[in-house]
Amino acid sequence: MTILMILLAVIGGATLSVQAAINGRLGGQVGVLKCAFLTFSVGAIVTALLIIYFEPKQAITLLDVPKWQLLGAMLGVPYIVIMVIAVQRIGTGVATVAVIFGQLAMSMLIDHFGWLHNATIAFSFTRLAAVACLGIALYFIYSSNKAA
């Protein structure tokens, strides 16, 4: 089951790269905020249909959860806007690796400190090495863009 979840996460990451490339082009033609609006509007419609047809009933509603948990929905907006702008200027590869670097660094802080009511997973040398390797990868990908 773990392998399947990792595979699904990799597929999810791949679709984010495709989305970033498409949105970068669209945002350059119609505007960053219109592109973000389209992304969230279509996403809301598709998600609403998925909820109607497939979501099992839950004992708790969105009105019942702690309000800080609703903030996660708003954090997608800066991501989309930033990616639409960044892809146009630095390319899909650099923008995507930079996002993954930020995700990895923040996720390790969340894990280490158990922030946001998550399980605590201690920071280790191997985790530091992973962040360093990704930082080096970001440098090389960015450098190759400048050379080209």
Image (cartoon, helix red, strand yellow):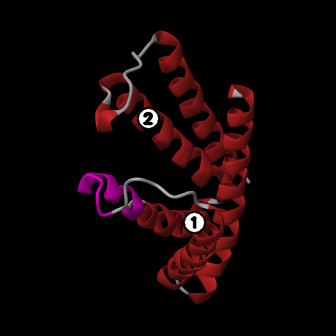
Q: With respect to residue 52, does 112 lie above or below?
A: above
Which residue in the protein does label 2 denote? 107
- Percent x, y for residue 58? 46, 55
Q: With respect to residue 135, does 67 lie above or below?
A: below
Which residue in the protein does label 1 denote? 89
Q: Quadrant of residue 22?
A: bottom right
The answer to if 117 sits in the magenta stretch is no
Dot 2 or dot 1: first in sequence order is: 1
Type of secondary structure dominating the magenta stretch: helix
Of all residues, the one furthest to the top in this rendering is: 125
Quadrant position of the C terminus in the picture: bottom right
Q: Nearer the viewer, residue 97 or 38?
A: 38
Q: With respect to residue 48, does 106 lie above or below?
A: above
Question: Which residue lies at the image location 60% right of the left edge and 81% below the top edge?
Answer: 28
Stretch in magenta = 63-74
Q: Secondary structure at mark 2?
A: helix
Q: Quadrant of residue 25?
A: bottom right
- Percent x, y for residue 48? 56, 73
- Percent x, y for residue 47? 59, 69
Pointer 2: residues within 10 angstroms few (<14), some, or many (20+)?
Answer: some
Question: Which residue lies at the image location 57% right of the left edge and 66% below the top edge?
Answer: 89
- Percent x, y for residue 56? 57, 57
Mark closer to the observer (2, 1) = 2
